[in-house]
Amino acid sequence: MVSYCFQVADSLEKGTEHEDEYMISEKELLVNRFISVPKDMGAFNCGAFVAGIVRGVLDNAGFPAVVTAHFVPIEGQQRPRTTILIKFAEEVLRRESRLG
């Protein structure tokens, strides 16, 4: 028997400044919770691995995008949340405006 465990992201938001941007935010991204980053690597975000997976899924579905991971401080909390920023290619916007 195969069991899968999926977690829903804390939020998915459309960018307010740029129409081509979406953000997936997670307070405790699994890879950041269980991977220790050496001090000499500074603020390296292991969420970059997740961003690569998101990019691959989008690209293979016909939605090319630049996908990056960022730490975002949360007021009153010691650990920042991770935001996966998705910036769709211009061709996606043009196609979606024709279809919508």
Image: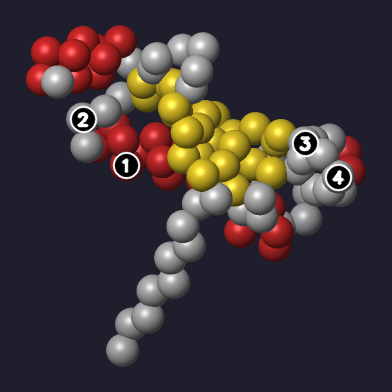
Q: Nearer the viewer, mark 3 or mark 1?
A: 3
Residue identified by numbered label 2: 62
Question: From the viewer's perspective, is 76 left or right of 46?
Answer: right
Q: Nearer the viewer, mark 2 or mark 3?
A: 3
Residue nearest the viewer, comparing 39 with 21: 21
Q: Amino acid at mark 1?
A: Val
Distance between mark 4 and mark 3 Cα atoms: 9 Å
Distance between mark 4 and mark 1 Cα atoms: 34 Å
Q: Amino acid at mark 3?
A: Pro
Residue identified by numbered label 3: 73
Question: From the viewer's perspective, is 37 left or right of 93?
Answer: right
Asked if disc 3 and disc 1 are in contact, CB closer than 8 Å, the reply is no
Q: Amino acid at mark 4?
A: Gly
Residue identified by numbered label 4: 76
Residue nearest the viewer, comparing 53 with 27: 27
Question: From the viewer's perspective, is 41 left or right of 23?
Answer: right
Q: Amino acid at mark 2?
A: Gly
Q: Is residue 68 above or below residue 40?
A: above
Residue identified by numbered label 1: 57
